[in-house]
Amino acid sequence: MDLSNKIAIITGAARGIGLAICARFCRAGACVVMADLDSEGLENSAALIQQENPAARCMTMTVDVADRPSVERMVEQSIAAFGRIDILVSNAGIWKNLTRGPFWQISTEEWQHTFRINTDGAFNCASAVAAHLIRQQSGRIIFIGSAAIGEALAHITQYCASKSALTGLMRCAARELGKDGITVNMVHPGQIDTGAFSREQMEERALQKFIHRVGMPEDLEGIVTLLASDEGSFITAQQIYVDGGGVLN
């Protein structure tokens, strides 16, 4: 799964799944634009990638995916730096600090804020790169969703709904862009160890899955790299769950 000289934008790149994908793309030969709202976290993560892989080619950009002008600047600066864009991995999102409780107790403000980042943010990014990919007659768009939508988790409806909305965007975008050689897919991680839960909690929940181990950010690397590569050129409009079988329970 060679990504040599491909130009990739990855949002939510400062930590967790986004950081793991950035590192894998660099190892596969891509030039990576690491985008996140956390400037300090970005710089630390980019330095870590560079330390582990001196040949890595990556640059950082502070971006608010919920703000369309911010996203458009990211795309313009990426093209100015590298001349093109080949891959978008739309990973940025929120969930950790969301209110847990019955859906009828979710405030309108929190509902809208969740959609603004998780759904509008992905729409902004995909919209901003689409015209460039069409001109090239090639490209990859990969949305990072959540296995929570398949499990229909209770007490976090705002998050599940915001990620569910992306499936419609993904499928329609795949239909509209397919004739231009552009694939659009969605990867749904299960519960991944990014430090949000104790290891004990993670291991206990892992026993409910088909594969009895805790999911790690690195578990997402392979499938996302496949979808981004030439080997994935005939895969589009797909939802792929990477959750150890948890969604079927």
Image (cartoon, rainbow, N blue to C red):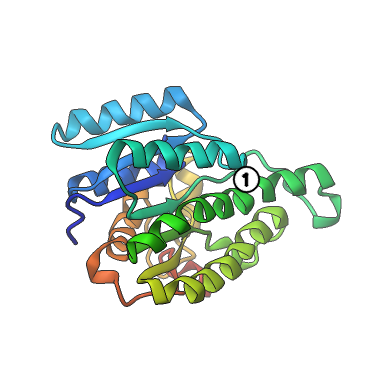
Residue under the image location 33 percent in, 61 percent down:
136
Q: Is residue 241 above or below residue 93?
A: below
Q: Is residue 57 above or below residue 114?
A: above
The N terminus lies in which quarter of the figure?
bottom left
Q: Which residue is mark 1?
A: 117
Q: Quadrant of residue 81?
A: top left
Q: Position of residue 176 (x, y in %)?
A: 51, 73
The reply to whether residue 149 is visible in this rendering is: yes
Residue under the image location 40 percent in, 53 percent down:
88
Q: Secondary structure at mark 1?
A: helix
Determine the residue located farthest toward the front in the rendered image.
Answer: 135
Please indicate whether residue 16 sits to the left or right of residue 197 in the image: left
The C terminus lies in which quarter of the figure?
bottom right
Q: Position of residue 206 (x, y in %)?
A: 45, 58
> Please, what is the three-letter code of the amino acid marked with disc 1?
Ile
Residue under the image location 19 percent in, 37 percent down:
56
Q: Position of residue 183 (x, y in %)?
A: 39, 69
The reply to whether residue 196 is visible in this rendering is: no
Q: Nearer the viewer, residue 3 or 135?
A: 135
Q: Is residue 229 above or below residue 35?
A: below
